[in-house]
Amino acid sequence: MDQGWAGLLAGLAGLLGAFVGGLAAVRGARIGAETNAAAVRQQVRDEALWAHQQWVRQERQKACLKVMDSYTNFHMQAQQGRDQLFAGIAVDDSAMQSLQQCIPELAGTCSHLALLGPSAIHIAGGVLRDKVARFATTMRLWNEDAAQLPDAAIAEWADILHDEGLEMKAAYQEFLSTSQSVLLGYVPGN
């Protein structure tokens, strides 16, 4: 009978070992599943963050290109009007109106940068917008008086417009530099 009890005890020990082993396997599987689920959640968060950052970068690029296009359109029209004024010829009303209509377009595209950030690019766009508006206003004021101006006054207006043109060009170069830095990722916090 000792062998019977020994077999029974061995069977119970095996059954107890299997039960403990089963519990350990279930616990291990649960821990593994939780770890895997956490890794998947982190991967999904990382991918969503990357996708969002990529979208913001693309939208910034579109906005910067629109600012550049708006500025180029304004600059080409302003250059023609400026050359006429330098020659003592008044710019016709439709050309001045077309030039003035470029400003809201530029202002609108610059305002999109406020949403997309960072502040450095928004500030650079705002400075450019202000310099363009100032240049256009000076051209308009000069053009209003162009017909009755003596040569000395034309030279004075030319100097003012030349200086404002340089400021506008510097603001555009700063916008380009800032945009490039932001789009290429050289500015912290972009």
Image: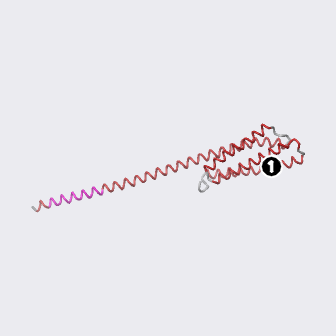
Dot 1: few (<14), some (14–19), or many (≥20) neighbours within 10 Å?
some
Q: How many marks?
A: 1
Q: Give the farthest residue toward the bottom.
A: 2
The amino acid on which the numbered mark 1 sits, given as a three-letter code, is: His
The coloring applied to the image is: secondary structure
Direction from residue 84 to residue 105 in the image, left or right? left
Residue situated furthest left in the rendering: 1
In this orientation, which residue lies closer to the viewer: 52 or 126?
Answer: 126
Q: Quadrant of residue 148?
A: top right
Question: Where residue 17 sits: x, y (%)?
Answer: 24, 59
Q: Who's the residue at 48% across and 51% down the image?
A: 45
Secondary structure under the numbered disc 1 in the rendered image: helix
Q: Residue at x 50, y 49 (%)?
A: 48
Reply above or below: 108 against 33. above
Query: Is 26 left or right of 41, judged from the image as shown?
Result: left
Name the residue beneath numbered marker 1.
Answer: 162
Q: Residue at x 74, y 47 (%)?
A: 133
| Whole-percent x, y for residue 157 in the image | 84, 48
Q: Is residue 118 left or right of residue 12?
A: right
Task: Please report the residue visible at 56 percent of the width from the left and 46 percent of the height from the top.
Answer: 55
Q: Main secondary structure of the magenta part?
A: helix
Question: Where are the magenta residues, as a range?
Answer: 6-24
- Location of the N terminus (image quadrant): bottom left
Residue 14 drawn in magenta: yes
State yes or no: residue 148 in magenta: no
Front-most of residues 43 and 97: 97
Give percent across and percent down for residue 91. Answer: 81, 39
The image position of residue 44, as x and y in percent, is 46, 50
